[in-house]
Amino acid sequence: MLETTDLTIRFGGHVAVDHVSCRFEAGTLTAIVGPNGAGKTTYFNLVSGQLPASEGRVRLEGEDITELAAPLRTRRGLGRAFQLTQLFPNLSAQENVRLAVQAREQGRGRGGVPAWLGGIDLWRVWLDHRAWTDEAMAMLEQVRLADKAALPVAALPHGDQRKLEVALLMALDPKVYMFDEPTAGMSVDEVPVVLDLIRALKSRKDRCILLVEHKMDVVSELSDRIVVLHNGRLVADGEPRAVIASPVVQQAYLGMAAEEPA
Ligand SMILES: Nc1ncnc2c1ncn2[C@@H]1O[C@H](COP(=O)(O)OP(=O)(O)OP(=O)(O)O)[C@@H](O)[C@H]1O
Ligand SMILES: [Mg+2]
């Protein structure tokens, strides 16, 4: 589904992602772990096209997408959680999700008769709008935000905004889901809502999920495979139990994670 070959980025003399070669198959959830500054988010940025690679290739379903801009990668099915700066802060949660649903449908060439094709079909516009709005509400219910659907996203507390990011990603329904610490900053009762959704996605078998996560209990429960980055390099890759037990993870990752403030 997704493959990176020697993917590299240099910031001046610093190599933040260093020749990372990795393949991700449909129907699998791969956790990407590593200490702070290991290059996990930067790797995601290179895959999604938010940053240009200094070297290496990115392939989606066998097609080289290395030169494609981020929006074109999204259109091909690469799904990166939106940052809130990419949302419409004054529109409601529901309107934001509806726009994501609408973008997906129109990207697939469905919905809405263009005006130049024989005038505007108001009946069709109304039906599409209603279907998109209903789907947006269903997404918001899944992340337990239905009661806040009408609020402008700028007014939502941090945990709700993170859940909204997940709802937006699901509305796009990409082939590859990239979650970067999806539960960071959430309260204990919000975390299971998001983890349940990721679990449900995983059971679909036709989607490929990449999850950057620091919480090792979450990682070992959800992942089929763990990839470890350290100083931008891929230093371990394999079955979760073996990777967690490996000396490189025990020292390089868990050792440092244990020193982080709670
Ligand atoms: N735009 C940039 N310009 C310069 N250096 C950058 C830039 N983006 C990232 N870096 C550097 O690249 C390295 C990797 O950062 P990155 O954010 O990918 O780490 P991470 O593994 O996601 O860490 P964390 O677990 O804290 O989120 C860091 O040393 C960081 O300072
Ligand atoms: Mg990061």
Image (spheres, grey):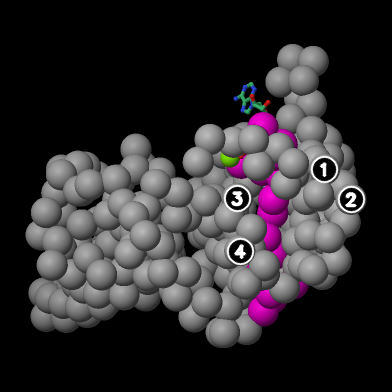
The residue tagged with tag 3: helix, strand or loop?
loop
CA separation in Å, label 2 and label 1: 6 Å
Whether pointer 3 and pointer 2 mark residues with C-beta atoms closer than 8 Å, the reply is no
Give 220 or 74, whichever is nearer the viewer. Answer: 220
At label 2, the amino acid type is Pro
Q: Classify 10 Å Cα crowding around label 1: few (below 14), some (14-19), many (20 and above).
A: few
Residue under label 3, please give it: 214
Give the camera-side residue of 144 and 164. 144
Left or right of 136 in this view: 256: right
Can you see residue 232? yes
- Find disc 4 in the rendering and name its residue: 217
Residue 173: image x %, image y %?
A: 46, 70
Is disc 1 in contact with disc 4, using a CB cutoff of under 8 Å? Answer: no
Residue 31 lies in the magenta stretch: yes
Give the vertical position of 72 relative to 131 (above or below): above
Tell me the residue at 37%/53% (across/down).
186
Circles 3 and 4 in contact, beta carbons < 8 Å = no
The magenta stretch is 25-43
Question: Which comes before the other along the chain, label 4 or label 2?
Answer: 4
**Residue 108 shown in magenta:** no
Q: Is mark 3 within 8 Å of ligand 1?
A: yes
Q: How many marks?
A: 4
Mark 2 vs ligand 1: CB under 8 Å? no
Q: Is residue 169 above or below residue 200?
A: above
What x and y, as percent, mark residue 189?
A: 33, 64
Mark seen at residue 247 = 2
Q: Closer to the N terminus: mark 1 or mark 4? A: 4
Specify the quadrant of the image occupied by residue 42: top right
Which quadrant holds residue 209? bottom right
